[in-house]
Image (cartoon, grey):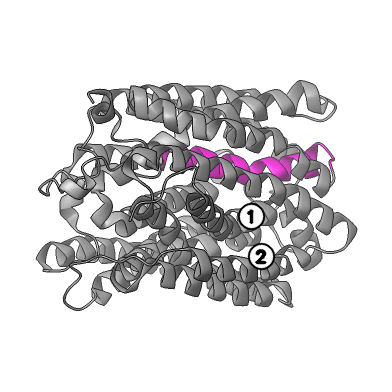
Amino acid sequence: MWVRHRSPAGRWVLLVTVLGSGLVVLDATVVNVALPAIGQDFGVSLTSLQWIVNAYTLTLAGLLLLGGALGDRYGRRRLFVVGIAWFAGASLICGIAPSAPALIVARALQGIGAALLTPGSLAIIETTFHPEDRSAAIGAWSGLGGVMTAIGPVVGGYLTTVISWRLIFFINLPLAVVAAWAALRHLPESREADAAGRLDYLGAALAALGLGGVVFAVTAGPVDGWATPPVLATGIGGIIALVSFVVVERSRHHPLVPLEMFRARQFTAANAVTFVIYGALGGALFLLPIQLQRVVGLSPLESGSALIPMTVAMLLLSSFAGRLAQRAGPRRPMTVGAFVAAIGLALLVRVVPGGGYWLTVFPGVVVFGLGLSITVAPLTATVLAAAGPERAGIAAAVNNDVARAAGLVAVATLPLVAGITGGGDLDPHVLSAGFRTAMWMAAALAAAGGALSYFTIRDDAVGAGTSATAAPDPAHHLSCPLDAPPLLGLQRRR
């Protein structure tokens, strides 16, 4: 039975899904702010800091597809709760890690828990809310998730400055307890009705090995050398695994990822836009806290607080953007939003010592947040609508995987291309020059995402809630996905 957006049951569903997925968002933003302190504590270089970020994203990206498929098959609420418990246990290990290598391993374990709970968050919204309310629910999910993003840098900065960076992981424990309790009490269980056959574990293994190998090579290649045996072996092995994954999925009766989803132009196009936009986002948010602390001279608390305007903009505008996209179509908000985000990133080039927060940081952060607010809800909803509610879990997993992979590639390559390399990679002068180059590149990526949206996204997307390759289901004919508004054109003709 559907729930409505403004009903008590609907509010509980939103609260629980935001709290669960917010753990993942909170942890990412908190860690970014604490990176300089972690680096000083362990005496490590930028490369190790990259791995503290990428180890988490690597396992998350590698196992998202499996997490989405497990939720569709065995119960989305069940996997959501299991993921929260796993994430909490790994957070405890992160908090007591005695060295950088130990922290990197613990972060990889965190990523596994995140891979189990993240697809379920979106899939639960897609399969629970009334079709007419899904775009608004996705917008509210995006905006409320922004609250966690806003809280993360401030809380993380405060804890890192006043006490220790280790507490940024311990704060996950009470939040996880509340999220698990609320999920068991207030979330309905749902699963794919016609799930049959054995789960595609071979496909899951090939996807994880392929993504892991390629990302490891991209991250380690600039430091160790592209011709070194480990980099060559993992890079080539990853490519072979990804090619094998496609071959295996095409031959399976019950594949991990039904490749026919990609025959829907809207689904493929929206994921391509996701990769470009989230590449710009991941690279910028990795380097900005480091620039603010190492070059501008802000404390972790001050640098974390500097990002609040961005998340406030998302909180206030995301739900509105979702409703607007449902009425007018996703193409225009995705196009305009990406170009606005590009302008915000370009403004961050002016972040230099002595520039002042209100004249340099604030304008860029506000404009960037405005652009993301306009873009994110329509983008996510479009992806899910194009796949249909019967594949909500795997579609959310694919879209999240694309976003995480984009962040991985950006964090691994943007500093290299921008010239932040070598033994002086944390030297303020090298950082400052490289940061400006990196922001111009991130702005160009965001603008490219806007152009891609304009030329590839349609307002008359896949019928509400039905996939391009499946017959329409009368029960879902109004369906509206979660991350990017797809069904707008359909709603307009009613």
Query: In percent of the image, x 75 and y 61: which residue is there?
Result: 38
Q: Which mark is residue 50?
A: none
Question: Which residue lies under the disc numbered 1?
Answer: 26
Left or right of residue 474: residue 26: right
Quarter of the view holding residue 134: top left
Please tell me which residue lies in front, 437 or 120. 120
Query: In percent of the image, x 79 and y 44: which residue is there?
Result: 293
Which span of residues is magenta-colored? Answer: 275-298
Question: Which residue lies under the disc numbered 2?
Answer: 175
Mark 1 burial class by Cα count in 10 Å: few <14, some 14-19, many 20+: many
Please report whichever mark, 1 or 2, sits nearer to the chain's N-terminal start: 1
Q: Position of residue 292 (x, y in %)?
A: 76, 39
Q: CA distance from mark 1 to mark 2?
A: 11 Å
Q: Position of residue 415 (x, y in %)?
A: 58, 44
Dot 1 and dot 2 residues touching (CB under 8 Å): yes
Please tell me which residue lies in front, 402 or 154. 154
Q: Position of residue 125 (x, y in %)?
A: 41, 52
Residue type indicated by callout 1: Leu
Query: In percent of the image, x 40 and y 57: which residue is there?
Result: 124
The reply to whether the magenta stretch includes residue 244 is no
